[in-house]
Image: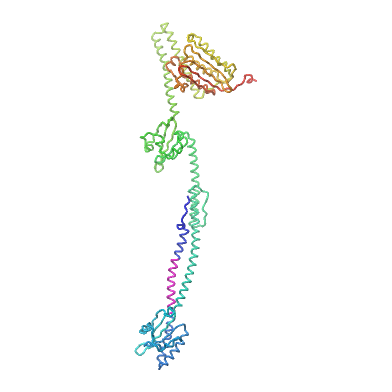
Amino acid sequence: MKKRLSIFKSIQFKIPILFILMLLLSLQLISANFIRQLESQTIDNFESQLELHYDFLKTNVAQVLSSAQTVEQKETAIYQLLQDASSRGNVEIRIVDRQGYIIGTNDQTKQSLVGTKATDIRLEKLTLKSRSDAIQYVDQETNERQMRIIGPAGVDENQNPLSYIVVDSNIEGQYRQVRNIAVIFFNSSLIAIILTIVIAVLISRGITRPITEMVEQTEKISEGNYSGSVHIYGEDEIGLLGRAINMLSVRIRDAQEASEAERQRLDSVLHHMSDGVIATDRRGKIVIVNEAALDLLNLNESDAFGQDILSVLRLPKKTTFRSLFTKQDQQIISYDSSILKCDFSVIQRETGFISGIVCVLSDITEQQKIEAERRNFVSNVSHELRTPLTSIRSYTEALSDGAWKDEEVAPEFLDVIQTEANRMIRMITDLLNLSRMDQKRMHLEKELTNMNDLFNHVLNRFDHILKQDEYKEKNYQIEREVTPTDIWVEIDQDKMTQVLDNIMNNAIKYSPNGGKITAHLEASNDRILIFIKDEGMGIPRRALPKIFNRFYRVDKARSRQMGGTGLGLAISKEVIEMSGGKIWVESVENRGSIFYIELPYEPFSVSEEFE
């Protein structure tokens, strides 16, 4: 944000003020000294001129006084002398004897004072002096300053002054001249101040303009705008500073672009990572979190940023943030319905300063589920193999102990051994088929098949089975609901036959005596629907979601007693899904179950196919 300086704090104001103050101080010192010396010099010069008047008169007056015999002669000679001296300037000259009487003056208007005693108190005091002296006083009539030179003129045999010369002159003109010169000096100083202000403003603008541009450019740099540059006005220090700022701008821009590219790469990596990533500051507050982490934790971005990582991950209360970056242990947490693996690592600078931690979240729910299924699978396979093997071993040991000699018992034992061996072979075959399906190594050998004929073929075979002695007393009935229209589809006949066999076998196994089994086949515009309904014990609601799991049995004891492996429905589901269809079950406990098979179907006639 740009901050505007007060005019009184700006260099553009301070530099002219500094120049003006320095000039005023210099002018004050110069003017005081100059005016004082000028005034002193002017007055001294004026005094010197009056001294020359005095010296000139002193000699002449002494000669006149020494040569004249009478008073009238003295006054006449002095009058003539003073008239000659008056031509030398606007000077009033008086000659006063030692008693203080005026014996001559050059002022024609004051000739009446000749012969009178001087009343000026200054004259009375100065006549007592034996040497010349200069004094200044203010004329009471004109109120102007005067300068007076008074001194003795001629001496008697006792070296006493015969008379005194008083030279008066108006000195106000000299002071006025000094004042005029001072006014001229003041006006010149004022002009100099104005010129100084103009020059100082220009100089300050010359200094502050590039500085202002530098400030603006640095503010743009701080806001992320590197497009501008500072104009270089000269090859001085400010110019060097401007070049340095331009170079700094270029380097910051390059560094920012590199950093932005790196950040975008990091964001892209974080965004496309399937694992969640959380980064914190040194206080454990979340500063970075990617979409995967938000999805795994079921949080919004605003709910995660700035929050404590311990509370967000719902770690145990005994866990502290310090323990996370000291031990960096892997932790497994249960979060809602998911199981997450948390790997912690420290963000550490080269100096060793720890600025935070990074947590990588992995959803291992499916892995845990697969691991649990694997353990259950191994346990079930081991159990299923152990049961027939135990039977085979027991009957084999019995035969080895001599039971083979018993013609009634031996065939029965051998029949059990054969039954259990066949059961093991069926189970191993089913496991191999499931393994091929899991590894995508089993492929369907599809061919154009009349589904009506295949469905009836399977049902005819089960009709024949139910006529055998084993099922005669059970009075099972198979009711057919088959559409009369031929349905031609591309399926793997062997695999589809296996699916129908599995479902029909289960229907017969779990149907009560006299139970009816309904087999239905129909076709619509884009699908084939098959369902097989029995009147057996049904499936509890809690078991319906698991009925197609491998080795899952609702009633394990009865299933083993009936010879099932627990893999038939799992294989059926895999085959139907590979064929692009789906299979599901509806059941009411103690009232029976209905297994549905739905397959994709595109109606066409055989004649069209072979035209």
State the residue at coordinates (50%, 42%): 261
Q: Is residue 196 magenta?
A: no
**Residue 94 appears left or right of 577:** left
Q: In the image, residue 128 lies at what x, y percent? A: 35, 84
Q: In the image, residue 399 lies at what x, y percent? A: 40, 10
The answer to which image quadrant residue 605 occupies is: top right
The range drawn in magenta is 24-46
Mostly what secondary structure, the magenta segment?
Answer: helix
User: Which of 533/342 is in front?
Assistant: 533
Q: Where, quadrant-wise, is the C terminus in this rendering?
A: top right
User: Which of 83/607 is in front?
Assistant: 83
The answer to which image quadrant residue 452 occupies is: top right
Q: Is residue 31 magenta?
A: yes
330 lies above or below 149: above
Q: In the image, residue 232 lies at what x, y percent? A: 52, 55
594 lies above or below 195: above
